[in-house]
Image: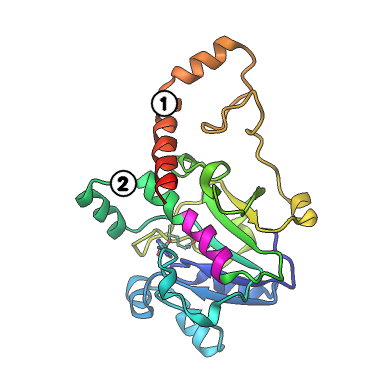
Amino acid sequence: MFLEPHWRVLTIGDGDLSFSYCLAQQQSVATVVASSLDSESEVIAKYRHQYTQYFKENKQEYYPGLDINKPEQFPKTLQGRFDAVIFQFPLITAQASRRKLTSHQYSSNLLNRQLLHHFLRHSKQYFLDPNGPMVAIITSKDVKPYCHWNIEGSLNHGLSMPYLGWLNFDLDAFPNYRIRNVDRDKFVKKTLAKSYYFAAKPSPLLAKQVTANRYAGARFCSLCRCGPMLTQQEWAQHQESKRHQQMLTFEKDWLAWLNER
Ligand SMILES: C[S@@+](CC[C@H](N)C(=O)[O-])C[C@H]1O[C@@H](n2cnc3c(N)ncnc32)[C@H](O)[C@@H]1O
């Protein structure tokens, strides 16, 4: 993960705080402020190993109960203080999924896209310092269903938070970090993951570090992240495929939600 040493970093939705703990221990950035969606007592009850005590003992700032969807509840003390905000392996909670099932309104795909869109929107509006580089980083697995969220495409529509590119996420660089399952005291299996970088300001240094979206060209399907397709026939076959049709449905629902806002 590329982070500049002088950056002030806020983490969002850090289940057991192990990622924030690693960042703080490594002293590779200027400051680390941690947050979790769960309250402190929920974190303690949920995870046998967690780092709330470390944050207390070391007088490191930690904000439990921070819901990225609810800007009206954001603590004022976090306003405009950060160079980068990081959300590692975002995923809606089981409670959010259940709400979806009872209301029959939104798919999991849509709810996860909303979560990430809110992360980008609210990081920019509330947490990032307008005098800094204004970077937001999402790390996510590169397999289904996560690759159905079109992170490199329409996630940031209407936000003036351009997508810069990705870097492979190297878990071995964070020795005590255990990627947590969303609602359980379980670890997520080690699979390929990428950190996706967004920034409200142009950053030639960052642009040099990351790999740009390779599926953006004319011969690629940016939704399905495949190609190049060299003939009309290949295109036609792809467009008729189940995979493409499913992505089209996700995208249509997503754009409809964005337009309703
Ligand atoms: C798969 S877990 C990953 C946990 C942790 N970031 C890690 O890397 O181990 C997904 C996390 O997203 C968090 N999350 C889900 N909805 C959220 C929201 N609205 N605001 C903040 N965090 C949220 C959950 O609390 C959970 O900790």
Can you give x and y, in whole percent of width and height, for residue 15 in the image?
A: 43, 67
Instruction: Describe the element under mark 1 as helix, strand or loop.
Output: helix
Magenta highlight on residue 117:
yes
Can you give x and y, in whole percent of width and height, for residue 207 in the image?
A: 75, 51
Magenta highlight on residue 246:
no
Q: CA distance from mark 1 to mark 2?
A: 18 Å
> Which quadrant is home to the N terminus?
bottom right
Along the viewing direction, whichever of 70 and 196 lies nearer the viewer: 70
Comes first in the chain, label 1 or label 2: 2
Residue holding disc 1: 245
Task: Say if disc 1 is inside 8 Å of ligand 1.
Answer: no
Residue type, mark 2 in image? Tyr
Can you give x and y, in whole percent of width and height, for residue 131 in the image?
A: 71, 71
**Region of the chain picked out in magenta, as a range:** 116-126
Residue holding disc 2: 106
Residue farthest left in this picture: 102
The residue carrying pointer 2 sits among few (fewer than 14), some (14 to 19) or many (20 or more) residues within 10 Å by Cα, namely: some
Above or below, 219 relative to 144: above
Q: Are marks 1 and 2 in contact (CB under 8 Å)?
A: no
The residue at the point 46 percent across, 45 percent down is 146
The residue at the point 54 percent across, 78 percent down is 78
